[in-house]
Amino acid sequence: MVYYGPEKLKKISEISLPQKEYLLEFLHSYKDKLDVFHKHLILISIYNQDNFALVIGSNPEGKIIYGVTLANPFERTPSLYKIKDFYDEALANFYDVIFKSSKIPKIQAGILKFPIQTHFLAVGGDKSLVSKEMFNEEVTGKTWLNFAKKVDDELFEKINTLSNGQIDFLKSFVTDDGVYFVGIGSGKFRNLYAEFFSVLRNKYGFLPGKFFPISGIKEKVVGMFKIELNDITNEKVFEKINNFVKDFNKFKRFVDELGGIE
């Protein structure tokens, strides 16, 4: 067995696949319907919408893989073959131990095909299975499983802090597509703030975050940008973000003071 990832998540090495015989039977029952059958696996995902997912699964040979992922894999790659209403209390409890979650996690189980298209913060399991899939990723230039090799305790804490985090008026969200920063603002000058937000985004060369779903954000949004996931350790990038915040707040104070003059 192997494990890659931060020491803080190494407890996931204790996880075990429940109802293994039943799950493998479910996987094999679709053998004739799945192309490249050996590339498929039966996977269980335990997750909360505002947190990472804990996953464990098996390939057709019964080799186990487990990990912690940025997103629920079933949201990234829809499964045609799911086990309806699958639930396991032991896995739900294990999730609570790992993430100290106050919410009851949701659980999904179904058949997915490698590669699992979400970044792994930690991954482990059967050495031959994990190593083979990591090698396949290197050949194709992908970094789903291999991302876990980069994640030490320090990086995990930074990802954890930025996930549903906040830097001044910027809310931050870590996704497989990058780290999104959403500017929150209100008041009668909000449209003006939005224009200046766009000016600053261009000034600092940040990517627009137009594909991030803001429907779940209750506050008024004045703008958005994103950075690449690999830039999460780039101090110069975060220095630019801090300068962005300073410039925006200066402008906001100026507009607020000007607006208060009769």
Image (cartoon, rainbow, N blue to C red):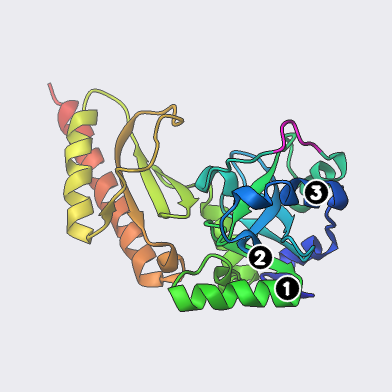
Residue type at mark 2? Ala
Callout 3: SS: helix
Residue 68 screen position, x and y as percent:
66, 57
Task: Give the mark, 3 or 2, whose residue is nearer the N terminus.
Answer: 3
Do the residues bearing badges 2 and 1 touch, measured as CB atoms within 8 Å? Answer: yes
Task: Give the mark, 3 or 1, whose residue is nearer the N terminus.
Answer: 1
Verify whether residue 23 appears in magenta. Answer: no
Question: In this rendering, is residue 238 above or below 137?
Answer: above
Callout 2: SS: strand
Q: Main secondary structure of the magenta part?
A: loop
Q: Residue at x 57, y 58 (%)?
A: 116
Q: According to the image, label 1 marks what residue?
A: 3
Q: Residue furthest left?
A: 262
Residue type at mark 1? Tyr
Question: In this rendering, is residue 192 above or below 239?
Answer: above
The numbered dot on residue 226 is: none
Verify whether residue 86 appears in magenta. Answer: yes
Q: Nearer the viewer, residue 54 or 189?
A: 54
Q: According to the image, label 3 marks what residue?
A: 25
Residue 182 visible somewhere in the drawing: yes
Left or right for 242, reference 143: left
Q: According to the image, label 2 marks what residue?
A: 122
Q: Nearer the viewer, residue 183 or 61?
A: 61
Whole-angstrom CA distance, mark 3 to mark 1, is 27 Å
Callout 1: SS: strand
Residue 130 screen position, x and y as percent:
67, 72
